[in-house]
Image (cartoon, grey):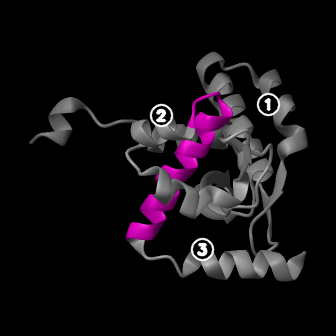
Amino acid sequence: MRKNRTRLWKKYLALMPRQRSSLSRSLSVLQRMRKGESLTRASRKAGVSTRTARKYVGIALSKKRRRWIPRRHDRIPRSMRIYEHGQEQVIIVPDFQTASNIGKYHSIIGRFLDSGDESILREAQRLRYIRDVQGRRHELELRPDVLYRIAERRAEPEFFQIYE
């Protein structure tokens, strides 16, 4: 398992910026397919050809009755944003399950920030620790005061600040 993670990580890092962009769009194709869209329609909406999508996420697809169907899980590395030790960081996660857990974490954090109800953060306790492609363990931030500070730093600038 460790050897496989290292191989995936090296393969991801070897991608050029344009290839990473294609991978990102292809992952959005895969996401749309998991919601029920066809490969053709999802590719069109994501702005990538079906051939490119199959090149980058083909390992997560199988063909059933002449139609491409997404597998339930995949092992495609992807970069994800997390909050750790009071800072926002970008890490490379090894698979769909880890990325999905980070998405659930962000959803919980968003609900907490909207409501101010600290009891919501208990839902994220089971998602607290994740591993990246190198096998490093990351502890997701769950301290309310720190989450508020991170949210303040991420606040959108005023319209007039953007266009001065």
Neighbourhood count class around disc 1 (C-alpha, 10 Å): few under 14, some 14–19, many 20 upward: some
The magenta stretch is: 18-38
Report the front residue among 48 and 95: 48
CA–CA distance in space, label 3 to label 1: 32 Å
Horizontal side, residue 71 vs residue 91: left or right:
right
Can you give x and y, in whole percent of width and height, for residue 42 in the image? 50, 37
| Dot label at residue 121 | 1
Residue position marked by numbered label 3 in the rendering: 12
Res. 123 image quadrant = top right
Q: Earlier in the sequence, mark 1 or mark 2?
A: 2
Residue at label 2? 41
Q: Report, in whole angstroms, how far the alpha carbon at label 1 lies from the one at label 2.
A: 37 Å
Q: Which amino acid, by three-letter code, is at mark 2? A: Arg
> Of discs 1 and 2, which sits in the foreground?
2
Identity of the amino acid at label 3? Tyr
SS for tag 2?
A: helix
User: What residue is at 62 percent from the left and 79 percent from the top?
Assistant: 11
Asked if the magenta segment contains residue 33, the reply would be yes
Q: Main secondary structure of the magenta part?
A: helix
Other residues around mark 3 within 10 Å, as few (<14) / some (14–19) / many (≥20):
many
Marks 3/1 in contact by CB < 8 Å: the verdict is no
Question: For the view shown, which residue lies furthest in the left direction?
Answer: 164
Q: Is residue 79 left or right of residue 156?
A: right
Query: How many labels sit on residues?
Result: 3
Q: Tell me if 65 is positioned left or right of 122 in this view.
A: left
Q: Are marks 2 and 3 in contact (CB under 8 Å)?
A: no
Let me know if residue 109 appears in the view. yes
